[in-house]
């Protein structure tokens, strides 16, 4: 009889030992990734991110498996519990919350240390000002799929709840990024009178991505298009798809027109822009959180050689280029130009380390630096820009560097003042939904 126990016990012990070893390996990987993220200064999430209730978590690791950013070790298992171990690389997909079988995960904005300003919205995306709605990145939802859904649902809510007014367009949509584009298609499909304004080009934040930057999204239903099943594509492919939709549907977007003020008038709003004015019954703000680039405020910044985004690195071939900034956009721009052209590239950053950038971008930058294609100037600030050079201060000394192009990637200005002028209330989120 005892022999039979041995026959059954050995496989059970083997399976148990394998499971224990596997859990130890996963836990070790999670702890190591957390330490690396902390050392790199990537322990603060930049936007929407998961908050995990350890008392509810059963350690099934389904959230880790579901995370689209698993290659960056955003989520991991530590001591048998799921943990956000690399917050700096989290971009708020939300797949983790959906996959959790016990409801241990919620999505929140900000942290106890770092607050994020978010407009106060109703479930139908209306602000405290009746008739003004917000969708997409400005409301904290920067992920393309979420922005498309919000743009659609916001216009549907406007069609249901807002009265039409004689002599006014039904809805004025500000922005033609993912949220604004979906909102425009929705307004068109519902037969609403609408005007869509975009200060730059179709795509909004996607248009501003560096050339060939990978864009991740997931299937979503969009009016006049149907099921959009793009899950992995490049910036160029996604923009080409949207441009084809624009041509086929005839959706109207007025480009190079910037909104300057929104004033209540006659039960609706008078919207003044850089080109004219509009009377609208409702307004949907589908703008980015950092649509206006932050400038350096130095002499010579008004020169034509100074730009605030890098679209195609090949246009800088053979030139002497200075990129200014220390975030992901700056590192991506500098690395892209160094990798794909024969330009002489320098990167100036006031800090002593790139703690705000993702690990893959820091690694890419370091490879370009080691190869000699890129010169990194830390603890430095631009003091003056001339036609043929830039003056940089480093360690109290002024350096004059020959230069033809300056690309400023110092982030953007959150439109908090604009919202306050319109009357929209903003709240600062400290780790809350």
Image (cartoon, rainbow, N blue to C red):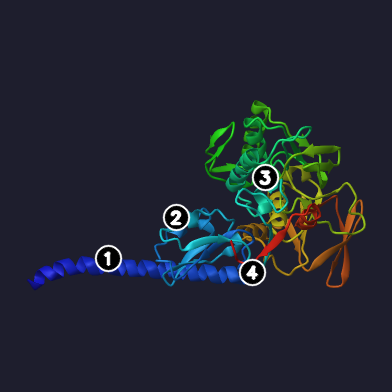
- Whichever of labels 4 and 3 marks the residue nearer the N terminus, that label is 4
Residue that mark 2 sits on? 99
- Which tag is nearer the camera, tag 2 or tag 4? 2
Q: Which of marks 2 and 1 is nearer the N terminus?
A: 1
Decide which of 154, 151 is in the foreground and name it.
154
Residue 394: give its label. Answer: none
At label 1, counting other C-alpha atoms closer than 10 Å, the crowd grade (few under 14, some 14-19, many 20 or more) is few
Q: Residue 206 carries which label?
A: 3
Describe the element under mark 4 as helix, strand or loop: loop
Identify residue for label 1: 15
Q: Nearer the viewer, mark 3 or mark 2?
A: 2
Which percent across, then down, holds residue 339? 68, 50
Residue 62 is drawn in which quadrant? bottom left
**Alpha carbon separation for disc pair 4 and 3:** 26 Å
Neighbour tally class for label 4: few under 14, some 14-19, many 20 plus, Cα within 10 Å: some
Pick whichever of labels 4 and 1 is earlier in the sequence: 1
Q: Name the residue under label 4.
A: 41
Label pair 4/1, CB-CB below 8 angstroms: no
**Left or right of 232, for residue 207:** right
- Earlier along the polypeptide chain: callout 3 or callout 1? 1
Distance from the alpha carbon under mark 3 to that under mark 2: 27 Å
Q: Residue at x 58, y 64 (%)?
A: 87
Q: Mark 2 and mark 4: span between their CA atoms?
A: 28 Å
The N terminus - image quarter:
bottom left
The Cα–Cα distance between marks 2 and 1, rounded to whole angstroms, is 26 Å
Q: Residue at image x 61%, y 72%?
A: 39
* SS at circle 2: helix
* Disc on the earlier residue, 3 or 2: 2
Q: Position of residue 161 (x, y in %)?
A: 64, 42
């Amino acid at each position: 009889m005892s022999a039979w126990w041995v026959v059954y016990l050995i496989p059970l012990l083997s399976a148990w030992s394998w499971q224990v070893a596997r859990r130890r390996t996963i836990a070790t990987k999670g702890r190591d990734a957390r330490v690396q993220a902390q050392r790199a200064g990537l322990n603060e999430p930049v936007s929407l991110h998961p908050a995990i209730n350890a008392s509810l978590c059963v350690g099934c690791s389904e959230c880790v498996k579901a995370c689209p950013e698993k290659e960056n070790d955003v989520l991991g298992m530590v001591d048998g519990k799921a943990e956000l171990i690399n917050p700096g690389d989290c971009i708020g997909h939300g797949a983790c919350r959906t996959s959790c079988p016990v409801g241990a995960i919620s999505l929140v904005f900000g942290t106890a240390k770092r607050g994020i300003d978010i407009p106060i919205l109703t479930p139908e995306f209306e602000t405290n000002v009746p008739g003004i709605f917000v969708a997409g990145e400005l409301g904290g939802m920067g992920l393309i799929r979420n922005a498309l859904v919000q743009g659609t649902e916001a216009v549907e809510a406007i069609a249901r709840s807002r009265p039409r007014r004689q002599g006014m367009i039904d809805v004025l949509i500000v922005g033609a990024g993912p949220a604004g584009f979906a909102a425009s298609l929705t307004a068109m499909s519902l037969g609403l009178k609408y005007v869509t304004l975009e200060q730059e080009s179709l795509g909004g934040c996607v248009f501003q991505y560096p050339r060939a930057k990978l864009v991740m999204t997931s299937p979503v239903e969009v009016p006049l298009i149907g099921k959009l099943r793009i899950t992995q594509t490049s910036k160029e492919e996604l923009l080409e798809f949207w441009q084809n939709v624009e041509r086929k549907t005839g959706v109207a977007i007025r480009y190079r027109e910037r909104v300057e003020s929104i004033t209540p008038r006659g039960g609706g709003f008078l919207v003044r822009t850089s080109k004219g004015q509009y009377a609208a019954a409702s307004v949907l703000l589908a703008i980015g959180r950092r649509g206006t680039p932050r400038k350096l405020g130095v002499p010579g910044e008004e020169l034509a050689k100074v730009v605030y985004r890098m679209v195609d690195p090949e246009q800088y071939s053979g030139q002497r280029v200075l990129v200014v900034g220390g975030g992901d956009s700056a590192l991506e721009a500098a690395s892209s130009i160094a990798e794909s052209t024969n330009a002489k590239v320098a990167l100036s950053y006031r800090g002593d380390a790139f703690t705000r950038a993702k690990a893959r971008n820091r690694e890419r930058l370091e490879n370009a630096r080691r190869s000699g294609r890129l010169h990194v100037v830390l603890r430095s600030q631009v003091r003056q820009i001339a036609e043929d050079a830039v003056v940089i201060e480093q360690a109290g000394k002024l350096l004059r560097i020959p230069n033809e192009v300056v690309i400023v990637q110092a982030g953007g200005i959150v439109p908090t003042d604009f919202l306050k002028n319109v009357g929209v209330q903003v709240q600062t989120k400290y780790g809350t939904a």
